[in-house]
Amino acid sequence: MSVLIVALVLTPVLLAVVIRLAGHARPVLRGAWLVMVALAASASVMSMTVPDLTVALGLTPWNSQVGLSFGRPASFLLVFVYWSIILSFIAPIWRPTADGPPKGIDLTWCLCGAICAGLLVNDLLARVVILDLVSVLVIILLLVSSPSDRTRFSVIWHYVVLRLGDMGFLLVALLLAQLSDSMSIGAAFGLSADLVGPQQQIVLVIAGLLAVWIKLGLAPASGWLRAACDLPVPQRALVLSGGPPLLGVYLLYRLQPTLAAMDSTLAVVVWAIVALMALASLVMIARPGQPKILRCATLHSVLALVACLTQTLVPYLLSFVPVRLALALALRDAAPHTETLDETRSPALPGRLSAMVASTACVEARLDGAVAALCRSPHRLGAWLQHYHTGKLRLNLLWPVLGLIPFLLALLVSTLGQRP
Amino acid sequence: MTNPSLSSLALLVALLTPCLGAGIALALPKRQRGRAGPIALGAMVLTMLALMLAWLLRSSANADGALGASVSAHGFVPALRLDGLAVPFVVNLIIVALLALYYAQGYLRHADNPHWCYALILLFIGGMLGALVADELLTFLVLWEVMLVSSWLLLLGWGEGPHVSEVTQRYFVYTQAGSLLLLAAVAWLAAASGSTHPDEIALYLNQHSLPGLPYVAAAMLLGFGVKMAIAPLHGWLPDAHAIAPMPVTILLAAAMLAMGAYGILRFVVGMLGATSIVMLQLPLMVLALISQIYGALMSLASDDIKRIVAYSSVSQMGYVLFGIAAASQLGLTGSVLHVISHGVLKAFLFMAVGVVIARTGRRQIAELGGLWRLAPRLMAALGLGILALSGVPPMIAFHSEWRILWAGLASNYPALGAVAFISPVLTVCYGLALFGRLAFAPEPPGLTIGQAPRPITASTAAAFGLAVVLGLLGGPLGRWVTDLLTATQGGLR
């Protein structure tokens, strides 16, 4: 069973390498798909019969024991992710179109392996690493599927937002590790409600909710999700059902004890802000021109927050992948999202960042000017001195006399000082 | 097998080899001055071998694994010491120096008076190496000046662009101001303790209290801070890096900036004691944060691709200072590890940018674009290098960043530690802005792409390979640095 658990994580990655090396040959794709079915079936049986099993993998670079914990609800989520990738790739693999399989199949299967690792790994920093890799893989998938350089340029900026979410999770992980003196996810999150002081609670809640918000793709961090809606159907299905959104909801599930233990004033403030932002997300998706899949996914993500508030997050979590998979497969928009950017110019920096950059450049220019003036001052002083030095004779004599006076004074003082 | 006397001799040989190489390069007859490059590279390889021999044969009796050599001359005893604290910085210097000299074989092929250029580069490297192994303050200061003067002459003689004299004047003023502060601090300590040896000064400070210790520490921190280009003492850096020939830029960014960090670790933390850092922890952490954010924003504001990478050094040195300011073993380990990761990655980024300039003949970002189709492998490597610099795991910078960020959270000012988490996001911003505009911006009219000289592309590929390998070895490297720092006597008193 330990071998099976490790295989569940590694097999999609290995199959992706094989597919890539085989040049996406149809027999290889079909064989890989069948392997995934076998693994999914085994995992389904194991998840129902084995309540909890941990496989130790070894020591991490940060000197903690890392392993894969095949326990509920992570085991159920992993099974759902496997079946989602199997179902979404039935058509492209068994009934491909004349164009052949869509681009990025190998990347999608790598992403599947990373998601499975992210669900099972039981070390805080290891999970940070995997979540970072999931973000990178999603962006690479978006880049590979982008139709033009202009679209690619806007896609890479979505990584900034995903990275912000990952840094939020890193802050949560390091804070919990410091408080609990343990890198184990179960121990750290389990003790968080008891160990966290008021100030740390604020930081934990803000950073955690920021990470969740961005991974769910709620406004204003919905750009990456919007771009993901334009992916080919199988890739879109995995990204929307099992990618960052699933990992975000899973993080919310882990944070729930901390959120429940919040001071009442803080809880009111936090949930009020969350409610307002959720409302803003809903208003934004009501704008014309938004794809149906994005609207449904956003609504479904807002329900996660409601579920957290009403302590119904577990059934929501368990239904997340099937619901999102159904949405991704059923809802197809007619035309892909069109860029509204000027053809001739690269996209400018986002508004707030642009303002920060402009003011910093202003400060730098002033600092530069001050230093340049300081560096020129000896030259100016010298020129001024030279101007007077090359004047009339009495001015010519003035400088040596002035220079000699301090010397004479020093001599006088030392002579007087030596007298008994 | 240990052989302390042979190891000390090897250390002396390592220090003298760059000077010898410089002398040979200068003595070359006119028709053979083209051989100055291979001679310089050979001298560096010999230096590396001598240092490896010195470290391997050192006495195991020393608890901190240090080896030393002293040369007495008329009562003045300049001493050398290669210990666990100096080793990571020496390793960084040697790697960067080899890469830079290999790159220079192609870059300086048509330079004026290349033999003088190589000689000064070797003196520059020799000055840095000497400062890293100096175990006596006057020796350190003399070699520090050798480093500064040789770099200044390199900028003056081989700087590119219309404002060379202005930029080199500014460089001189900044760096000499920093040196004067160091000299003042050393003079004060020598007058108080009667010695110029760090161990003896440390012993004196343990037994007596020096009333002006905060001022001495502040003077040293400012002096080394100029070298690290911590904002607002960074004014020399962007222009100097922009005008310098690329091999010199690589040495300035990837090796010389680390000297400031070394100086703080050796002489402020190691000699004055960690309490001197703790006393000034708040201003140091604030300055470090300002550097991180300021450098990143200025990188976003720049149009010259060399300046973009140059300003990122200000930001990265802010990380290093932040780790030092956290005043914990984890923070120090993270800082030293970040010096190595920054050295290799920054060398690669400058080399990659240099390849772009060599192949397109352009430096302004508005005049570049569409390189994803014209040079896909270069762009892919550049993208990976930028991700690595941003701390994306499993690359090496991730291993240093999480240590530094954790040390910040565990420090006396955890709020500042939390604010520091924004810096990796800003790193990604300017990194992706550079990559995105080079790779995916519309191809400007008239842009043609040629071939760069082989040594330039080969050294860039070598730097990339090294960055990937170090990334995969991030964990063992972190443990190695931790062991080295823990074993060093007085690492964190």
Image (cartoon, coloured by chain):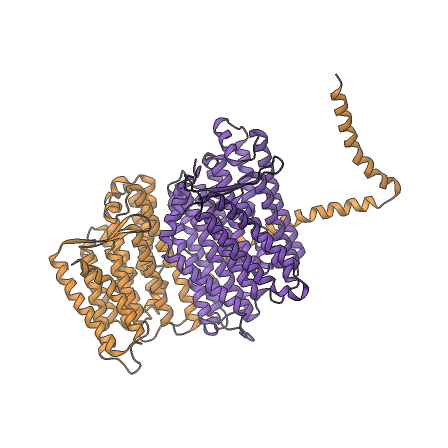
* Residue at the far bottom in the pictured view: A98
Q: Is residue B116 above or below residue B377?
A: above
Is residue B137 visible to us here?
Answer: yes
The quarter of the image holding the C terminus of chain A is: top right
Give the x, y percent position of residue B143: 59, 45
* Residue at the far right in the pictured view: A393
Q: Report the side of B21 relative to B466 (left or right).
A: right
* Residue at the far left in the pictured view: A49
> How many discs mark residues in the rendered view?
0
Q: Return the residue nearer the eye: A342 or B299.
A: B299
Q: Return the residue nearer the eye: B50 or B438.
A: B50
Q: Report the side of B309 relative to A262 (left or right).
A: right
Q: Is residue A89 above or below residue B322?
A: below
Residue in the image at 47% along x and 48% along y: B54
Chain with colour purple in the figure: B
Is residue B297 visible to us here?
Answer: no
Give the x, y percent position of residue B399: 38, 52
Residue A176 image-quadrant placement:
top left
Give the x, y percent position of residue A40: 18, 66
Q: What is the drawing colour of chain A?
A: orange
Q: Return the residue nearer the eye: B105 or B229.
A: B105
Q: Report the side of B458 relative to B405 (left or right).
A: right
The quarter of the image holding the N terminus of chain A is: bottom left
Give the x, y percent position of residue B240: 59, 55
* Residue at the far top in the pictured view: A420
Residue B160 image-quadrant placement:
bottom right
Q: Report the side of B93 relative to A38 (left or right).
A: right
